[in-house]
Image (cartoon, rainbow, N blue to C red):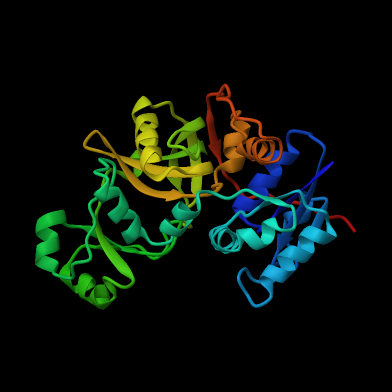
């Protein structure tokens, strides 16, 4: 029996991965880690381990100890901090003999800075890149992007820290942060024209399998409602971006349609918060990753069920 270790098991992404694996009834021993004393993680794991904060002093030694103690075959980082930490320390972890579900090293690094990410897309004449600027000249930006416009953190995820600027007073409150911490973008598309795409990429400029949802976001920035959406336009956009960035393994692309053109909001070089939703419609990239990284099995495009998903709060009871 293979031992699969998922970090951040109490996060939406983490238990989404575990739930997707467990739902197949395949015989894996699932190990999960969490910083929380009480969480949902034990409901989806065979072994649940309390973890130190990602990247804290001694974290790499702790990861290696877990791998050795539990004879881990495959490590799946679920959230951004662990993806970046494990990517930066992948050689040391691989010395244990465990495999890692990690994306292209350069892409993981690039996605940590949205401005650098934009520069790479721009230099490759990518038609899906949203125009961006580090200018702090309000009049110049209004002339270029119009109002309202967005101030977006260069580092961050799930729409956290984004400021919608409707006037110069609001702009001036954040003006000093533009450049080092913030970048400027126009608002593209509408809230009801947002899409999240999962693709299992081949690392060579293409992908093996793909699924797209038309979605509505929660206040926290995660997908709250999702409906299966078939779009050749989005598939072509994903392929075009893959040719430039060469992602590998589970990769999340987020788009809006603006004036009939796909605009890339961001890429997450990892599993996404929609993982469990995707598996419910036949696209189980958690199992794809296990088979790909442990057995060398190439994923095939699955038959996607049609329908929609809605997230809701649910109780889980642990009886004494």
Nearest the camera: 259 or 61?
61
Query: Which quadrant does the C terminus fall into?
Result: bottom right
Tell me where residue 49 appears, x and y as whole percent: 78, 62
Tell me where residue 198 appears, x and y as whole percent: 50, 38
Q: Is residue 273 left or right of residue 194?
A: right
- Is residue 181 placed above or below 166 in the rendered structure? below
Q: Which residue is at the far right? A: 320
Tell me where residue 144 appears, x and y as whole percent: 12, 56
Q: Residue at x 20, y 57 (%)?
A: 148
Q: Which residue is at the far top? A: 303
Q: Is residue 212 left or right of residue 62?
A: left
Q: Residue at x 22, y 52 (%)?
A: 131
Q: Residue at x 26, y 71 (%)?
A: 178
Query: Which quadrant does the N terminus fall into?
Result: top right
Q: Mark yes or no: residue 9 visible.
A: no
- Is residue 165 placed above or below 99 in the rendered structure? below
- Is residue 320 placed above or below 61 in the rendered structure? above
Q: Is residue 309 left or right of residue 122?
A: right
């Amino acid at each position: 029996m293979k031992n699969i270790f998922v970090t951040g098991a109490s996060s939406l992404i983490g238990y989404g991965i575990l739930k997707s694996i467990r739902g197949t009834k395949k015989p894996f021993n699932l190990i999960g880690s969490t910083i929380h004393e009480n969480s949902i993680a034990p409901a989806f794991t065979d072994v649940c381990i309390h973890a130190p904060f990602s990247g804290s002093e001694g974290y790499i030694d702790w990861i290696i100890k877990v791998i050795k103690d539990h004879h881990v075959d495959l490590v799946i980082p679920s959230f951004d901090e662990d993806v970046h930490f494990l990517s930066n320390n992948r050689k040391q972890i691989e010395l244990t003999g465990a495999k890692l579900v990690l994306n292209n090293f350069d892409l993981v690094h690039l996605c940590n800075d949205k401005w650098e990410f934009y520069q790479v897309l721009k230099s490759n004449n990518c038609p899906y890149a949203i125009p961006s600027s580090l200018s702090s000249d309000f009049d110049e930006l209004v002339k270029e992007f119009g109002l309202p416009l967005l101030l977006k953190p260069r580092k961050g995820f799930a729409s956290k820290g984004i400021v919608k600027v409707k006037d110069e007073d609001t702009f001036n409150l954040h003006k000093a942060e533009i450049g080092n911490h913030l970048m400027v973008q126009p608002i593209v598309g509408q809230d009801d024209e947002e899409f999240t795409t999962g693709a299992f990429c081949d690392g060579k400029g293409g992908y093996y399998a793909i699924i797209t949802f038309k979605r509505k976001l929660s206040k926290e920035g995660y997908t709250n409602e999702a409906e299966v959406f078939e779009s050749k336009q989005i598939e072509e956009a994903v392929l075009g971006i893959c040719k430039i960035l060469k992602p590998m393994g589970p990769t999340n692309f987020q788009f809006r349609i603006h004036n009939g053109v796909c605009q890339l909001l961001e890429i997450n070089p990892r599993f996404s918060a929609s993982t469990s939703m995707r598996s419910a419609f036949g696209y189980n990239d958690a199992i794809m990753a296990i088979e790909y990284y442990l057995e060398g099995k190439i994923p095939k495009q699955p038959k996607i069920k049609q329908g929609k998903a809605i997230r809701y709060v649910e109780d889980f009871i642990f009886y004494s």
